[in-house]
Amino acid sequence: MDLSPETAALARRLADARRLPVDTVVRDALAAVEERSLIDPDGKRDVSPEAIAARKASIREIVAELASMPVLDPRPVQQIVDDINAV
């Protein structure tokens, strides 16, 4: 793989700063981009805009259902945790 001089220099600077091999920092950077993107490395998930919209709609329905549930204990979370830990 041929990289431009600018890209190679950037990879070397990052590798030097992290004290890691260039290969490792490039792989880590690409993996991070892949994780945040629509790329499905296993090819098992539909990443079409329609499928993404359907999943988002499903999540919104679940969130709405949870939000409509009654509050069983209005105390702040920390107070509940403190009370449980006091037992």
Image (spheres, rainbow, N blue to C red):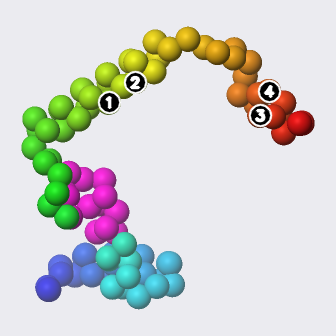
Give the labeled residue for mark 4. Answer: 79
Residue segment shown in magenta: 29-41
Residue type, label 2:
Val
Q: Tell me the quadrant of the picture where the C terminus can be found.
A: top right
- Element at badge 2? helix
What residue sits right under mark 1 in the picture? Answer: 59
**Quadrant of res 65:** top left
Residue 39 position within the rendered picture, expressed as x and y whole percent measured from the top left: 19, 57
Residue 13 visible here = no
**Magenta region, main secondary structure:** helix
- Residue labelled with disc 2: 63
Q: In this view, does 66 lie above or below 53?
A: above
Give me the disc on residue 81.
Answer: 3
CB contact under 8 Å: marks 2 and 1: yes
Name the N-terminal-most of marks 1 and 3: 1
Element type at mark 4: helix
Give the amino acid type for the residue marked by disc 3 in the picture: Val
Q: Given the image, on which type of amino acid does mark 1 rest?
A: Ile
Name the quadrant of the N terminus.
Answer: bottom left
Q: Name which residue lies at 17% across and 52% down.
A: 45
Residue depicted at 24% across the width and 53% down the height? 37
- Tell me the quarter of the picture where residue 71 sits: top right
Mark 4 residue type: Gln
